[in-house]
Amino acid sequence: MTQQNNDLDKIKQLIDIMKQNDLVEIEIKHDDDKIFLKRSQPQITQNHPAAVPMMLPNVPAAPPGTYAAQTAAPQKTPEELQKNAVLLEIKSPMVGTFYAASSPDSDPCVEIDSTITPQTVVCIIEAMKVLNEIKAEVSGKIAEILVTNGQAVEYGQVLFKVKPD
């Protein structure tokens, strides 16, 4: 096993430990090496549910002794339903920094409407000073790019949405 794969496995293990123990951040120092991982918010579990803010519709109160009518969910157009139903997600396999191209002078690996195959490199993620090519693992056309160049990404974060062939 290469050093890079070994390091990635250790990072994934740390992420799993963070999730299992509802940790928001973790810092480990060993000799000259240091790793610091931080999540934007704690994971919600059955044992420790977090409060989730909700927007409630402004509905007048029902008169005493009657039941308030439930508000219907907004109707989506068939195009919206079809668009959301068939899009595949390409997620980040690691924590790191997202780069759209292999170098600052290069064109982006993919753009909106780019045709991709499972072997297409869609971006680069830098983790621990190692540049990792991320392959699509799906076929289709890029429908959405959800991150920007230089943005920090988390493990499992959706990077792209793809309309399959």
Image: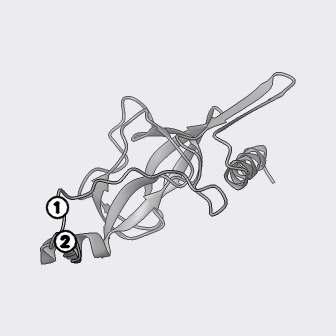
Q: Which residue, given by chain and number where applicable, does mark 1 sit on?
A: 59
Whether 87 is drawn above or below 16: the answer is below
SS at mark 1? loop
Q: CA distance from mark 2 to mark 1?
A: 8 Å
Q: Is residue 97 left or right of residue 107?
A: right
Q: Is residue 32 left or right of residue 78?
A: right
Q: Residue furthest front?
A: 64
2 or 1: tag closer to the N-terminus:
1
Q: Crowdedness of circle 2 by 10 Å Cα count: few (<14), some, many (20+)?
A: few
Given the image, on which type of amino acid does mark 1 rest? Answer: Val
Q: Is residue 30 left or right of residue 35?
A: right
Q: Do residues under tags 2 and 1 come within 8 Å of each other at their CB atoms? A: yes
Whether 26 is drawn above or below 91: the answer is above
Q: Where in the figure is residue 132, as x and y percent of width and height?
A: 57, 45
- State the quadrant of the C terminus: bottom left
SS at mark 2? loop
From the viewer's side, name the closer residue of 137 and 103.
Answer: 137
Which residue occupies 57% across, 54% down?
93
Q: Residue furthest top?
A: 32
Whether 61 is drawn above or below 7: the answer is below
From the viewer's side, name the closer residue of 128 and 54.
Answer: 54
Q: Where in the figure is residue 109, as x and y percent of width and height?
A: 37, 47
Q: Which residue, given by chain and number where applicable, does mark 2 sit on?
A: 71
Which residue occupies 49% across, 43% down?
124
Which residue occupies 15% across, 61% down?
60
Location of residue 25 by image quarter: top right
Q: Where in the figure is residue 74, as x and y percent of width and height?
A: 16, 69
Given the image, on which type of amino acid does mark 2 rest? Answer: Thr
